[in-house]
Amino acid sequence: MAKPRKKLQKKSPVAARLSPAKICADEARYMLQTYRRPPIVFTHGRGARLYDSQGREYLDFLAGIAVNALGYANPRIVKVIRREAGRTMHVSNLFHNPYQAPLARKLAEWSALDRAFFANSGSEAVEGALKLARAYAHARAGNGRAPKTRFLALENSFHGRTFGALSVTYPAKYRQPFEPLVPGVEFVRFNDVADLESKFDGTVCGIIIEPIQGEGGINLVSDDFWRRARELATQHGAALIADEIQAGMGRTGRHFAYQRFDSLPDIVTVAKPLGSGLPLGAFLASNEFASVISPGMHGSTFGGGPLVCAAALEFLSIVEEKNLLANVRERSAELRAGLEKLAAQFDFIREIRGEGLIIGIDLSIEGGPLVKDALSRGLLINCTHEHILRLLPPFIISRRDVAEFLGKFERVLAAASKSARPSASAASGAQAPARAAALAAAR
Ligand SMILES: Cc1ncc(COP(=O)(O)O)c(C=O)c1O
């Protein structure tokens, strides 16, 4: 791999002891082969920069897939984690800890919902949200009447890997090897109001929607679709669940992506950036839905421990005090303007879409080789659906970072224009009817 950039940072003491080749060999020998990884070992970071064991620097426009919103080694987060590690890392949920309540209160202020439950990951937050929708349906059914049990989700959705979350996740490649999944899930065509209306009836207990689909290729749910989903959920006493795990907590330049619509969901799932890099997920709910939960119905050993909740509270304070939502919006405008210029230059860029710092670059060529080339030039990005490049930089990026990104990315595009292969999935379109039919048949 070509050297991306001159050494800017001394090797860390840990890095000095590491052999990337040995690490890769041991991973290949001893780990489940769930990830395809380049032969690089990242050892430390600062701000929006990440460093590997050879001391090479990378500008990180992926941020751990939307986790590292404050970049790396934020001094305030480091201080809080050190402080809490010296107090109690874990206190059982049988008892109070000092940080859950203030964090729940802050999340209620940000979301305009009422109550929070803390879990350890996005998938677990989704599990809780689905369970809450079912519990609400049970509570409302009463007197021997059968509760409604069906869920609706959207085509191209991604909600996680546990059984419930996987059941509402669309791509067959994630689902098929583990079937049968939770029964009673039906997928609605993206932004297709007529399809939504035909599938939403009195047997549905919840519909789960990413207001901006992340893994699905940075697709924005339309106002009309959201409004109709809200109306139908209210009409049928079902939960409207917003999965904000990737797009939420400030990434769009708003606290939550659903805040661009004029109505609220009943339940919201969050995770990724919330714990500042520590594992923390949550679902938030209106009082109407939350009221059906009583002690013992749901719980978690680790969820909402003092260390991670203190880090999350600090994260939210930093976003507010440093006015990071404004930074997200301003950097986004610069990035989008630069990308539009590049789109005019390179005809294999079909569309730029997204909001704030969740941006998709839809290509008519395969994206994988561009991600690899970017890495070799010291730039971290990602590709989803084989042809959509995804940018999820930290909220703290500067104007200089954006300019550096655009300069490097232009060189990646220029190289690709000489050697690129057309993308089969882009040519057929991710939503091509034949492919969608094949996927439906596969289920
Ligand atoms: C929208 C969305 N929901 C749920 C999840 C699952 O989160 P986790 O990987 O923390 O379980 C993800 C992860 O990428 C996601 O993007």
Image (spheres, rainbow, N blue to C red):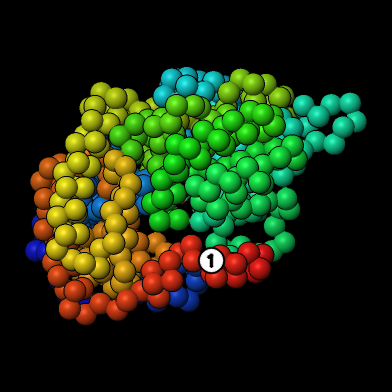
Q: Is residue 51 above or below residue 365?
A: above
- Check mark 1 vs ligand 1: CB closer than 8 Å? yes or no: no
Q: Nearer the viewer, residue 225 or 70?
A: 225
Asked where in the image residue 197 lies, by quadrant, the reply is top right
Q: Nearer the viewer, residue 82 or 43?
A: 43
Answer whether residue 9 is visible to the viewer in this image. Answer: no
Q: What residue is drawn where x is 80% and y is 36%?
A: 147
Q: What residue is drawn where x is 58% and y is 23%?
A: 286
106 relative position to 16: left or right: right
Image location of residue 43, percent across then percent down: 28, 57
Point out the image quarter for the C terminus.
bottom right
Asked where in the image residue 284 lies, by quadrant, the reply is top right
Image location of residue 84, percent across then percent down: 40, 30
What amino acid type should be assigned to the residue bearing mark 1?
Pro
Q: What residue is drawn where x is 56% and y is 32%?
A: 230
Q: Nearer the viewer, residue 226 or 151?
A: 226
View extreme (right): residue: 144
Asked where in the image residue 171 lies, by quadrant, the reply is bottom right
Answer whether residue 180 is visible to the viewer in this image. Answer: yes
Residue topped by disc 1: 433
Q: Count all numbered tags in the image, as a single digit.
A: 1
Element carrying mark 1: helix
407 relative position to 311: left or right: left
Image location of residue 363, percent across then percent down: 30, 65
Point out the image quarter for the N terminus.
bottom left
Image location of residue 46, percent across then percent down: 21, 46
Q: Is residue 247 above or below residue 405?
A: above
279 relative position to 15: left or right: right
Q: Nearer the viewer, residue 138 or 40?
A: 138
Q: Is residue 178 above or below residue 355?
A: below
View extreme (front): residue: 194
Mark 1 crowd level (few <14, some 14–19, many ≥20, 10 Å Cα): few
